[in-house]
Amino acid sequence: MARFLMITSTSGANRELAAVFVSTATAKGHDAAVVDLAEMNLPMFTVARSKDPDETPDISDLVTSMTQADAWIVIAPEYNGSIPPTLNNAIAWLSMDWQSFRTMCTGKPVGLATHSGGGGAHVIMAMRQQFSYIGADVIGRTCMSGRDKEANPETIDAMIDNLAR
């Protein structure tokens, strides 16, 4: 049994897609949880803010959840041809302690998914580059959905099986 963490960068349709991944994973006997980065309401990362203890958010629960998960599925919409600000911001805060961040990310199996109005190919490419750069093992298969394209249940099923290995 694997422990999955679905990381969604927005509420709404991407949060709903995360719930589909959770139900698929739990139906297969895995543990699964969702972290909604939009609900965390993290302050915008700046170097100045990161050096001020009064301005630095407590992300210890997020770090613990990400560390304890066997695999992540990152679900984000495309924003201006790239990653949404909530995801970039969370990664910036997580990377403040670079050594523990690399330890948490290196070799972590990661799946990528999106519900985007424009199809989502650009956000998938951007996330693949970002998560590969930080050392994660990003699987090849992705889930892309949008207004005119429902998420393929076979793709979700296959991603869960692949990441659970």
Image (cartoon, grey):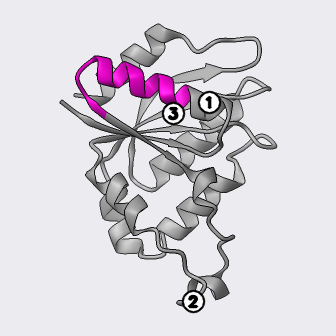
Residue linked to disc 2: 54
Q: Is residue 30 above or below residue 47?
A: above
User: In which quadrant will I find the C terminus?
Assistant: top left
Mark nearer the N terminus (2 vs 3): 2
The image shows residue 96 at horizontal and vertical percentages of: 48, 75
Tell me if residue 141 is in the magenta stretch.
Answer: no
The image shows residue 55 at horizontal and vertical percentages of: 60, 84
Range covered by the magenta-colored residues: 17-31
Q: Amino acid at mark 1?
A: Thr
Q: Which mark is nearer the camera, 2 or 3?
A: 2
Please, what secondary structure does the residue beneath circle 3 have? strand
The image shows residue 45 at horizontal and vertical percentages of: 65, 73
Between 143 and 150, which is closer to the camera in this rendering? 150
User: In 3D space, how far apart are the residues under numbered discs 1 and 3 (Cα atoms)?
Assistant: 7 Å
Q: Amino acid at mark 3?
A: Leu
Between 18 and 101, which is closer to the camera in this rendering? 18
Residue linked to disc 3: 112
Name the residue rendered at 65%, 40% in the picture: 11
User: In 3D space, how far apart are the residues under numbered discs 2 and 3 (Cα atoms)?
Assistant: 34 Å
Asked if residue 81 shows in the view, the reply is yes
Q: Amino acid at mark 2?
A: Asp
Q: Is residue 145 above or below residue 69?
A: above
Q: Residues within 10 Å of mark 1 (few under 14, many from 20)?
A: many
Answer with left or right where residue 28 lies relative to residue 131: left
Residue linked to disc 1: 114
Between 88 and 20, which is closer to the camera in this rendering? 20
The image shows residue 80 at horizontal and vertical percentages of: 81, 43
Answer with left or right where residue 33 lies relative to residue 46: left
Between 17 and 93, which is closer to the camera in this rendering? 17
Q: Main secondary structure of the magenta part?
A: helix
Q: Residues within 10 Å of mark 2 (few under 14, many from 20)?
A: few
User: In which quadrant will I find the N terminus?
Assistant: top left
